[in-house]
Image (spheres, rainbow, N blue to C red):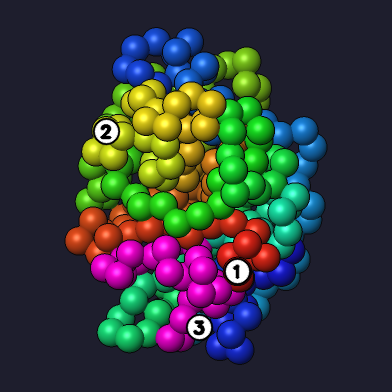
Amino acid sequence: MRAVVAVVGAVRGAVALGTAAVLAMGLSGCGGRANGQADAAPPHASPSADVTQLPGVGPGMRSRIPADARQVVLVTGADVDSIDSDVGLWERRGARWHLVDWWQGHNGKKGWTPHHTYGDYRTPIGVFTVHDAGGVLPNPGTRLTYQQAASYQPPKWWGKGTEHIFDYTIAIDYNRVIGSPPSDQRKPQGAKRGGNIWLHMDDGRGTAACVSQSREKMLELLRVLDPAKHPVVVMGDAAHLAA
């Protein structure tokens, strides 16, 4: 996987309220351990960029970004089967995009897909709005609508290392009711299309379909994302993003 590299233009970078058992079933599109550790991360260059177009995002994908979006979380995988992602937080300032920060994360343990289905362990490719957040822990200062609930706690059978991955979550608006907490199990396009696709904390492995990152970066996202700036997540493998 290639690191997010700026300046030179090569930046590539879920439960019905109730029981933990319901959470475990409903979040099968999100957390859980992948089989095997992620590959070692390559070294990163230190980015600092202001660009007119989001790097690596081609005209097809770019046309899907709402005109009023002024914050973008850009998640890029090296190829369609990669579980490693470069994540860049971009903010539009006038006519240019400014790279606020970048880091590494993980996506689905089988990579990416433009046609996500329940249980395929691939993260859906596309442009998705962001409105709602939640987690085990109290609101850390986000302006997104936030739900604190103990029911976000992952089931113990997911294993060691997953205990805190849902301390904080942000719902990606894929097959969900916008304005409801991430724990809401309603899926407007039907259960076969999957759902409960979140930004959440990392356990060092690929996910069941979500995008994960460190606690530090989750807190950064929660505190920086601003509903008034109409944030979106643009995500996929490099080839699909460039189309």
Residue flagged by tag 2: what amino acid is it?
Ser
Query: Residue 24, position in %: x, y?
Result: 51, 18
As displayed, is residue 220 above or below residue 46?
A: above
Residue under label 1: 243
Residue 125 visible somewhere in the drawing: yes
The residue closer to the viewer here, 70 or 239, is 239
Residue under label 3: 48
Foreground disc of the pair 3, 2: 2
Residue under label 2: 180
Which quadrant: the N terminus? bottom right
Residue flagged by tag 1: what amino acid is it?
Ala
Query: Hey, which residue is sitting farthest left in the picture?
Result: 228
Tell me which corner region of the image, top left, top right, bottom left or bottom right, holds residue 186: top left
Start-end of magenta stretch: 51-74
Question: Which circle's residue, 1 or 3, is located before the other in the chain?
Answer: 3
Query: Residue 237, position in %: x, y?
Result: 65, 59
As displayed, is residue 129 above or below residue 73?
A: above
Residue flagged by tag 3: what amino acid is it?
Ser
CA distance for labels 2 and 1? 32 Å
Foreground disc of the pair 1, 3: 1
Query: Residue 41, position in %: x, y?
Result: 73, 60
CA distance for labels 3 and 2? 36 Å
Tell me which corner region of the image, top left, top right, bottom left or bottom right, holds residue 123: top right
